[in-house]
Image (spheres, coloured by chain):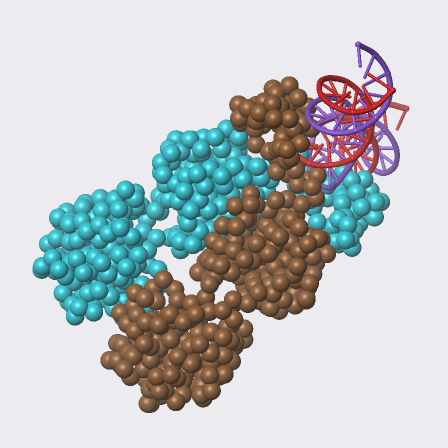
Chain colours: A brown, B cyan, C red, D purple
Amino acid sequence: MKDVSIKDVAARAGVSAGTVSNVLNRPGKVAEETRLRVERAVQELGFVRHGSASSLRAGRSRSLGLAVIDIANPFFTEVAAGAEDVASAEGYAVLLANSAADPAKQERVLRVLAEQRVGGVLITPVGDELHQLDLLRERGINVVLVDHPAHRPDQCAVAVNDVAGGTLAATHLLASGARALTYVSGPLGIRQCRDRLDGARRAGAPVTELIVPAMNARGGERAAADLLAAGPLPEAVFCANDLLALGLLRGLLQAGVRVPEQVRVVGYDDIDLAGASVVALTSVRQPIRRLGQVAAELLLDECDHPETHAHRQIMFQPELVVRESAP
Amino acid sequence: MKDVSIKDVAARAGVSAGTVSNVLNRPGKVAEETRLRVERAVQELGFVRHGSASSLRAGRSRSLGLAVIDIANPFFTEVAAGAEDVASAEGYAVLLANSAADPAKQERVLRVLAEQRVGGVLITPVGDELHQLDLLRERGINVVLVDHPAHRPDQCAVAVNDVAGGTLAATHLLASGARALTYVSGPLGIRQCRDRLDGARRAGAPVTELIVPAMNARGGERAAADLLAAGPLPEAVFCANDLLALGLLRGLLQAGVRVPEQVRVVGYDDIDLAGASVVALTSVRQPIRRLGQVAAELLLDECDHPETHAHRQIMFQPELVVRESAP
DNA sequence: TCGATTCCTTAACACGTTTCAAGAGGCCCG
DNA sequence: CGGGCCTCTTGAAACGTGTTAAGGAATCGA
């Protein structure tokens, strides 16, 4: 029932508490024979190091925070999986913080992370109000920005190049002979939507914007209805994400439009179901899990080797996955 | 730069450290005027409580663990979102632990949680080897099982009734006149698959099993191919999840089969895209987020009020969402 | 004046880490 | 063969920070 402490282990092994601590943290410093005796005592008593006590002395805990905008969003889920991979391999705990796209809630959860004295935070900040991040850094908490540009040079950041992704999609659509394309997207206030549009424009052809309020399948159906009502269909449509694209596809197919013969469609994200649609979706894939892994690696490096750590801003490149909707 | 401690606040406010602690934890115990002075000092110095120090004395930290089988799986993602809602509202931190369906890794991550002295753990255990959970309880860490039956009476558990879900789906399919149905599923070693099959059988008609190795869209396409090759198509198919169902749908539709006229299809989970398929999918919906919220509520109640806490095993009921694939 | 109350201070405490010094044993040199 | 010195290992004690029980000072009512 009662917790076994390092002292109990020490007593059992016939050594002092300091020696037990050395066995746990610098096994090389302790004579082989003593070490084995201590390790046996740890086993027998079922001792588990008290994380709070360690971090109290050390000043920071072996944990890192992961602050995301929406934990139920598959993008962040993949980031979380990648980060957890890396962190748990290093014996770090991951503290989950969901800002739910609410700046006030973000402030609250960052406070909790600060109280826990996490070594660092992986964050996709809500909005562009970043002074909260500076507050974290003042407290000695390292910050790595995820899918958001660094706002200062002495900071790590990882992102996927959305402009390149837009260009990739648009170039592919234009390569089949289309003269113009339509971009179906959520509000352009969202950086990702804006960047992908910019990228598409760089492919050289005129781009018509079709903005819908929600970036889900319903939004895509709505877009399909709008296109059908508006007159001649575009030859090529680029959607800011796969949910929009799948909704659009449904709307078009139900109206008897042939895809890709009449309209070619490219989505973004390459979600699991992109290939499972009746007309399998061509889509831009992002290396999200890798993004999470690298972000965590950068953060852990910053935590564990602050002197040698070099701040880096890493931009991953997306790739196009060609399927039936735009061969 | 340097951390401000409770003593700095005490000095600034002209009181003792103990008083500051009382302001933070039992504001009622402190005179109004003093309280305001302390609160002002906290503000001015930007003091943040040192979580490790608190938990060291208190014996446990204001945090809980969330141990899931696959953090990238939308089911667990929703559970996580629900749990995070509740926990962060109570000022608790959520420690994320991904067992990746690997018992050895589960053991490692549970160890990390034990080191952090979390107040409790929300866990969907890997396999049926539950003695690790008993080890946690011996250490005073409360456990709530998620989507897994309690293995002892003095324990909380939350789950969704998969048997009822199977019956719901099968009954609906049979109501339209089908005499028999086919169940497309992953391995029956998975409890959810087994329970849903049991439930379907209870609807009264003969059920043919079609087992595929992976519960994703590819598995569904594979099932469609098998059905098409096997001879007369079944009138009704129940899939153990929506990915299977969508893959099946794609396979059937591409082969020119009309859904629902020739084959009626029901899926499970009601994922976002269920309604966005060309033939919108009828599916069994589970209140997953609610599951996560209630699980966290039970756990926090157990942590904060151990004397009055009553262990409960809660079973949520799924509901059928009727769409085009099986009207 | 005495007890009750209110409010605050003091000091012990939780527990692993780390520093410093001392003990043990071995080795070199005379 | 013995003393001095060095190395390796171990133990004792301080430390970090907030919590809490016990106690004391001041105020108030009777």
Left or right of B234 on screen, residue B21: right
User: Which quadrant of the rendered structure holds the N terminus of chain A?
Assistant: top right
Residue A203 horizontal/vertical position (percent): 46, 83
Q: Is residue A114 visible?
A: no
User: Which quadrant of the rendered structure holds the C terminus of chain A?
Assistant: bottom left
Q: Nearer the viewer, residue A152 or B44?
A: A152
Q: Is residue A308 visible?
A: yes
Residue A276 horizontal/vertical position (percent): 30, 65
Relative to B52, residue A194 above or below: below
Q: Residue at x 39, y 84 (%)?
A: A174
Left or right of A263 on screen, residue B39: right
Q: Residue at x 34, y 47 (%)?
A: B160
Residue A188 horizontal/vertical position (percent): 51, 77
Q: Nearer the viewer, residue A276 or A286?
A: A286
Left or right of A150 on screen, residue B271: left
Relative to A228, residue A44 above or below: above
**To which quarter of the image does residue B134 belong?**
top left
Q: Nearer the viewer, residue B278 or B44?
A: B278
Relative to B317, residue B304 above or below: above
Q: Nearer the viewer, residue A82 or B327?
A: A82
Q: Residue at x 58, y 39 (%)?
A: B116
